[in-house]
Image (cartoon, rainbow, N blue to C red):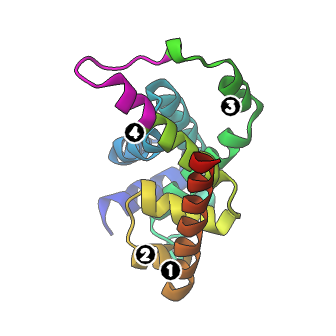
């Protein structure tokens, strides 16, 4: 049994076991990066990562290693939390009150390029949120989690052809929406 599996076994018996710190430490940076790529907000990414790991620890007893790897299970929880966040009232409120003066851009970057990149990422994230849940999961894992299509098929336990069909259909729809916004 590898160390990760031992930690999980300990946590299933007692969530307050020191193994919790080891398990969270192993995946924290990866989850933070996954969230940050979708939000482009450091503080928000820290908050959401913390919420995700609280959820992981609270629901560790329901984790079944026969269905998916622990890493995949954490990504699934993170994706669901991001969907919940983007549907929340606080996100919609932030979209209304945020102004250009609130953007803090690092020195040395062209503000126009940085702002355009942030707007593109926000637009893609917003469009991803409009997809059905299965397509959202595939797109999030591919674009933001950097999974291969084969890894997604295995983790979601669906045929590779289904993953490809949903992914490429979602990309086509997203491109069409973005082109429509630019020309409309």
Is 3 or 158 nearer to us in this picture?
Answer: 158
The x, y position of residue 49, in whole percent, is: 50, 38
Residue named by callout 2: 149
Task: Pick out the residue farthest to the left.
Answer: 108
Is 156 or 114 nearer to us in this picture?
Answer: 114
Q: CA distance from mark 3 to mark 2?
A: 30 Å
Task: Determine the image quadrant of residue 88.
Answer: top right
Q: CA distance from mark 4 to mark 2?
A: 31 Å
1 and 2 marks in contact (CB < 8 Å): yes
Residue named by callout 1: 164
The x, y position of residue 161, in whole percent, is: 52, 87
Q: CA distance from mark 4 to mark 3?
A: 30 Å
Q: CA distance from mark 1 to mark 3?
A: 30 Å
Q: Secondary structure at mark 3?
A: helix
Q: Secondary structure at mark 1?
A: helix
Q: Is residue 17 left or right of residue 96?
A: left
The residues colored magenta run: 103-116
Position above or below: 26 against 152: above
Task: Pick out the residue farthest to the right.
Answer: 89
The x, y position of residue 175, in whole percent, is: 54, 60
- Mark 4 vs 3, N-terminal side: 4
Residue named by callout 3: 91
Q: CA distance from mark 1 to mark 2?
A: 7 Å
Is 40 or 70 nearer to us in this picture?
Answer: 40
1 and 3 marks in contact (CB < 8 Å): no
Crowd band around label 4 with a 10 angstrom C-alpha radius: few (<14), some (14–19), many (20+): few
Residue named by callout 4: 21
- Mark 1 vs 3, N-terminal side: 3
């Amino acid at each position: 049994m590898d160390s990760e599996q031992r930690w999980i076994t300990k946590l299933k018996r007692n969530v307050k076991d020191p193994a919790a710190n080891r398990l969270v430490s192993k995946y924290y940076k990866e989850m933070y990066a996954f969230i940050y790529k979708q939000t482009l907000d450091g503080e928000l990414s820290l908050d959401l990562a913390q919420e995700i790991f609280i959820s992981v620890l609270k629901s560790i007893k329901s984790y079944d290693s026969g269905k998916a790897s622990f890493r995949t299970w954490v990504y699934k929880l993170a994706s669901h939390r991001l969907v919940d966040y983007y549907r929340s009232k606080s996100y919609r409120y932030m979209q209304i009150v945020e102004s250009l003066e609130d953007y803090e851009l690092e020195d040395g970057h062209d503000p126009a390029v940085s702002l355009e990149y942030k707007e593109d990422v926000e637009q893609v994230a917003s469009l991803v949120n409009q997809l059905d849940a299965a397509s959202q999961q595939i797109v999030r894992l591919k674009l933001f989690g950097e999974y291969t299509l084969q890894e997604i098929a295995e983790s979601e336990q669906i045929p590779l052809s289904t993953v490809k069909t949903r992914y490429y259909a979602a990309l086509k729809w997203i491109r069409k929406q973005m082109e429509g916004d630019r020309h409309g």
